[in-house]
């Protein structure tokens, strides 16, 4: 069992892929070898468990921890700025083989102000680097928006900082539609392996499950919100349609949903002409389990948490690659 430290945890999308229960529609899976069993909801399947254990989680959002508690997926979850954690002389990080996390991405996003490293949030990746330096895991995995690649020098700086710690670092722009996720989400995955082992000069971040899945499969089992007892499905934005801006279109269920964003401000896309996507539908688009508990009373706060998350299926496929890399290391003495 490999111990994992999770940074910028949120509601644990990446954590689920590494050490939790991943449930997806069968059309998202290219090979039955990944499937453990059928789920209670028709055409959904639970994937085989991975060989990881989350030993520490950290995020600044108390509400995100609360969602993890709803689902019993909180593991030593510390709600505090990672800067404050690092500054606490009495705190010691647990030993771990892997450090994972999606450092805040708004300053790199093409939809944001593009401040990059010229902002307080833009330098939070340095905290990720500091944790890796202290823990010295065998492997780390960091996630960010594709805008990281278009700010001059940004990705080179990030890679250089990790390499200076003694890691072989690769990065790749992942298109989620190519790996069974029904969403036009593109994310940069940065992975580093401690360079005391020999790996191939170049290696892919994901080696399995090359397939596509239309979003309609994830919605097929859903009735309309007023017809079922599901708080997450009854929670949806009532914002009127605007003449311009993001989130003003109806999704094409025969294809892929647009990227679930953290900053919807109520303007999430429409499922039908008279209703925007519900929290449940947004979660399904991100490949959270169909029975995942996002809220226990009607509210839209979960939109932000869902948009911030790494899709659990994406994390699961990355975790498989990490498992392969870990085989190159000798067992801990």
Image (cartoon, grey):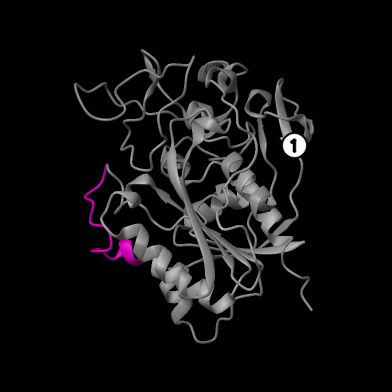
Q: Is residue 143 left or right of residue 137?
A: left
85 within the magenta span: no
Q: Is residue 149 left or right of residue 45?
A: left
Quadrant of the rendering where the C terminus is positioned: bottom right
Relative depth, front residue between 296 and 184: 184
Secondary structure under tag 1 reads helix
Point 56% across, 48% down: residue = 205
Relative depth, front residue between 176 and 70: 176
Q: Majority secondary structure of the magenta segment? A: loop
Quadrant of the rendering where the N terminus is positioned: bottom right
Give the answer, above or below, for where 11 lies relative to 277.
below
Point 75% across, 29% down: residue = 39
User: Residue 241, image x and y in percent?
Assistant: 26, 21
User: Residue 55, image x and y in percent?
Assistant: 66, 65
Which portion, as a residue range, is magenta?
111-124
Residue sticking out furthest to the left: 243
Residue 35 visible (yes or no):
no
User: Residue 29, image x and y in percent?
Assistant: 67, 29
Question: Image quadrant of residue 288?
Answer: top right
Question: Image quadrant of residue 38?
Answer: top right
Point 30% across, 52% down: residue = 108
Question: Which residue in the structure is indicated by mark 1?
Answer: 34
118 within the magenta span: yes
Crowding at mark 1 (Cα within 10 Å: few <14, some 14-19, many 20+): some
Relative depth, front residue between 109 and 81: 109
User: Residue 92, image x and y in percent?
Assistant: 58, 81
Q: Is residue 297 left or right of residue 45?
A: left
Give the answer, above or below, for where 315 lies relative to 51.
above
Residue 203 visible (yes or no):
yes
Relative depth, front residue between 327 and 203: 203
Residue sticking out furthest to the bottom: 89
């Amino acid at each position: 069992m490999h111990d994992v430290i999770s940074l910028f945890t949120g509601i644990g999308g990446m954590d689920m892929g590494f050490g939790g229960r991943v449930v997806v529609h069968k059309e998202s899976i290219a090979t039955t070898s990944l499937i453990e069993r059928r789920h209670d909801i028709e055409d959904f399947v639970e994937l085989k468990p991975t060989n990881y254990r989350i030993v520490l989680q950290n995020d600044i959002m108390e509400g995100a921890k609360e969602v993890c508690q709803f689902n019993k997926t909180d593991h030593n979850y510390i709600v505090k700025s990672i800067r404050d954690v690092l500054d606490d002389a009495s705190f010691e990080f647990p030993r771990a083989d892997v450090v994972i996390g999606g450092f805040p991405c708004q300053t790199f996003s093409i939809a944001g102000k593009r401040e990059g490293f010229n902002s307080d949030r833009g330098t939070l990746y340095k905290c990720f680097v500091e944790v890796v330096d202290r823990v010295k895991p065998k492997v780390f995995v960091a996630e960010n928006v594709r805008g990281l690649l278009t700010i001059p020098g940004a990705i080179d700086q990030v890679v250089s900082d990790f390499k200076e710690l003694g890691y072989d670092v690769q990065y790749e722009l992942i298109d989620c539609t190519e790996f069974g996720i029904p969403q036009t989400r593109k994310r940069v995955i940065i992975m580093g392996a401690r360079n005391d082992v020999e790996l191939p000069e170049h290696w892919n971040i994901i080696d399995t499950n090359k397939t596509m899945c239309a979003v309609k499969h994830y919605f097929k089992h859903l009735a309309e919100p007023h017809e079922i007892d599901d708080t997450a499905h009854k929670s949806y934005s009532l914002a009127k349609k605007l003449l311009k801006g993001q989130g003003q279109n109806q999704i094409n269920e025969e294809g892929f949903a647009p990227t679930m964003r953290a900053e919807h401000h109520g303007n999430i896309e429409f499922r039908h002409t008279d209703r925007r996507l519900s929290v449940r539908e947004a979660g399904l688009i991100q490949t959270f389990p169909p029975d995942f508990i996002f809220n226990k009373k009607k509210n839209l706060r979960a939109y932000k948490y869902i948009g911030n998350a790494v899709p659990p299926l994406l994390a699961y496929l990355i975790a498989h690659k990490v498992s392969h890399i870990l085989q190159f290391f000798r067992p801990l003495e």
